[in-house]
């Protein structure tokens, strides 16, 4: 199993968690798993919306101690 | 203490000047030395490129000689770094000269990579270089009406630029008396029209007032130049007569070539601003991989922290403060009004209505920059 790439986008307003995810997704290879950490309240809904629309794979989405942990696999 | 600054943009120049002033006694006593390596003998005020693209500034107004901006005590070489040997504390330049250091500051910046998106370089206008800004202005002057599409690559320098571009286009076409013949469509990569929520809340009604069409969740996949269609990763497409792009960026090739960071962004501690795993290497501005805006403003505030900490290391053997994520961005809301966004890691920006005095302040800052980059402001 390949290593999970952590994207620490906690406490950031610009460029923001989803922009950070898109940046890292472009650098990743198909099949890679990325875990986004975000303190942005909206991430729990915004990130899956983008992931589903663009066609990547949502693995998990949970909030632990105020931090969203969102795992995504790059599908294309 | 030998301090080597690699890069002569906003961040590197402020670090070097601020340090030279703080360490003037130590430098006179030859206990400290500051050397700067840069790829160019010129320094560009990059925010001015947007004005060039609208015919409000000419390119020559954006430049100063780099040497004229530096404290005389700084040793300055136009000789870009090519090889970083961090374990040996040395950097080798294009000319073959080797510079050893005790503390290294990497401030190499970022570059546009429109070629990452098929058709973008050929099909879209942009304003992120002198040549492209001039070319864009010539296209705008020739444009007599039709559909203008704006697309935004990720990541990009100056996150406010897409919004400023729309305001400027609206005012430009209005001033030419052809605004009613131009449809403007704005595309943005995430699910709201700006990544900063409060900027989106402020700008959305402004865009509606100006009659701007907005499509969100649009990441540029390719441009069909022949048929004038821009397509998204999300499987949507837009026809255009004139396409304007905020191009995607990467860090500099020398960073990638030396394997200092993926895509040219160096892994950096968000508070200390040191390179991960290298306590004597500081990273400033666009070069970092931090989730912080890639702007001259972030580089400025980071540079102040870095220079204060390096000076403290020289004087008392320890750094004294952390970077809090501070950024201050002017937002030009057309050709006669502006506002600003100020925020840090903990506090979001609270936007005020755009005003003429803030635009005048921004106009003044376009000149004050040269004082700022000297480390005086």
Image (cartoon, rainbow, N blue to C red):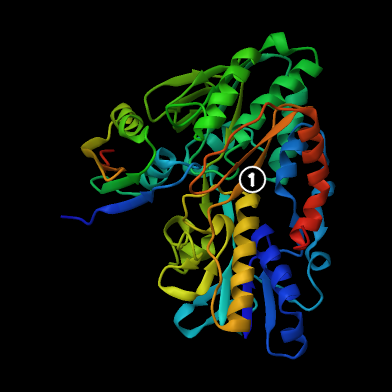
Mark 1 secondary-structure assignment? strand
Q: Quadrant of the C terminus of chain A?
A: top left
Q: Residue at x 80, y 39 (%)?
A: B361
Q: Note whether residue B226 is visible.
A: no
B123 versus B75 height, above or below? above
Task: Please name the residue that numbered disc 1 is placed on.
Answer: B328
Residue A25 position in % (x across, y down): 35, 44
Percent position of residue B365, x then y = 79, 45
Q: Residue at x 75, y 73 (%)?
A: B21
Residue at 48%, 58% in the rendered image: B264
Rendered image quadrant of residue B121: top right
Residue occupying image coordinates x 40% and y 41% = A17
- Image side of residue B20 versus residue A38, left or right: right
Q: Label 1 lies in what chain? A: B
Q: Quadrant of the N terminus of chain A?
A: bottom left
Q: Nearer the viewer, residue B322 or A46?
A: B322
Q: Nearer the viewer, residue B299 or A56?
A: B299
Q: Is residue B275 left or right of residue B110?
A: left
Position of residue A4 measured from the top left corner of the image (x, y, whole percent): 24, 53
In the image, residue B291 sits, relative to residue B356, either above or below, namely below
Residue at the extreme top = B180
**Nearest the eye: B200 or B92:** B200
Query: Which one is nearer the viewer's eye here, B326 or A19?
Result: B326
Horizontal arrangement in the rendering, residue B291 relative to residue B6 (left or right): left
Q: Position of residue A6 (x, y in %)?
A: 31, 53
């Amino acid at each position: 199993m390949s290593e999970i790439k952590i994207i620490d986008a906690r406490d950031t307003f610009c460029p923001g968690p989803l922009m950070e995810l898109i940046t890292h997704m472009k650098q990743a290879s198909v099949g890679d798993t990325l875990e986004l950490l975000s303190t942005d309240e909206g991430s729990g809904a915004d990130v899956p919306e983008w992931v589903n629309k663009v066609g990547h794979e949502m693995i998990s989405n949970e909030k632990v101690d105020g931090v969203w942990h969102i795992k995504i696999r790059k599908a294309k | 203490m030998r301090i080597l600054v690699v890069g002569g943009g906003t961040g590197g120049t402020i670090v070097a000047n601020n340090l030279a002033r703080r360490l003037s006694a130590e430098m006179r006593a030859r206990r400290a030395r500051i050397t700067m390596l840069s790829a160019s003998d010129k320094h560009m005020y990059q925010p001015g490129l947007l004005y060039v693209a609208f015919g409000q500034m000419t390119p020559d107004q954006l430049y100063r000689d780099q040497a004229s901006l530096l404290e005389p005590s700084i040793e300055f070489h136009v000789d870009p770094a090519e090889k970083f040997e961090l374990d040996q504390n040395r950097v080798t330049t294009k000319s073959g000269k080797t510079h050893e250091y005790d503390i290294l500051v990497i401030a190499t910046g970022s570059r546009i990579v429109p070629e990452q998106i098929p058709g973008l370089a050929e099909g879209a206008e942009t304003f992120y270089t002198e040549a492209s800004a001039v070319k864009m202005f010539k296209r705008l002057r020739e444009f007599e009406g039709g559909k203008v599409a704006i697309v935004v690559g990720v990541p990009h320098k100056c996150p406010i630029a897409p919004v400023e571009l729309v305001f400027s286009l609206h005012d430009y076409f209005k001033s030419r008396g052809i605004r009613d013949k131009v449809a403007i469509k704005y595309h943005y990569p995430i699910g709201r029209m700006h990544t900063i929520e409060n900027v989106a809340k402020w700008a959305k009604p402004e865009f509606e007032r100006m009659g701007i069409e907005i499509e969100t969740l649009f990441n540029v996949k390719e441009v069909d130049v022949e048929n004038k269609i821009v397509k998204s990763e999300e499987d949507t497409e837009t026809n255009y007569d004139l396409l304007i792009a905020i191009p995607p960026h990467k860090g500099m090739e020398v960073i990638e070539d030396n394997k200092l960071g993926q895509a040219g962004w160096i892994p950096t501690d968000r508070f200390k601003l040191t390179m991960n795993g290298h306590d004597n290497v500081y990273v400033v501005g666009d070069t970092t991989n931090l989730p912080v805006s890639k702007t001259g403003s972030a580089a400025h505030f980071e540079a102040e922290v870095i220079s204060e900490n390096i000076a403290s290391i020289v004087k008392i053997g320890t750094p004294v403060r952390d970077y809090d994520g501070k950024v201050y961005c002017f937002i030009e809301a057309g050709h006669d009004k502006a506002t600003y966004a100020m925020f840090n890691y903990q506090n979001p920006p609270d936007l005020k209505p755009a005003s003429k005095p803030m635009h005048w302040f921004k106009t003044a800052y376009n000149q004050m920059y040269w004082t700022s980059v000297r480390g005086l402001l």
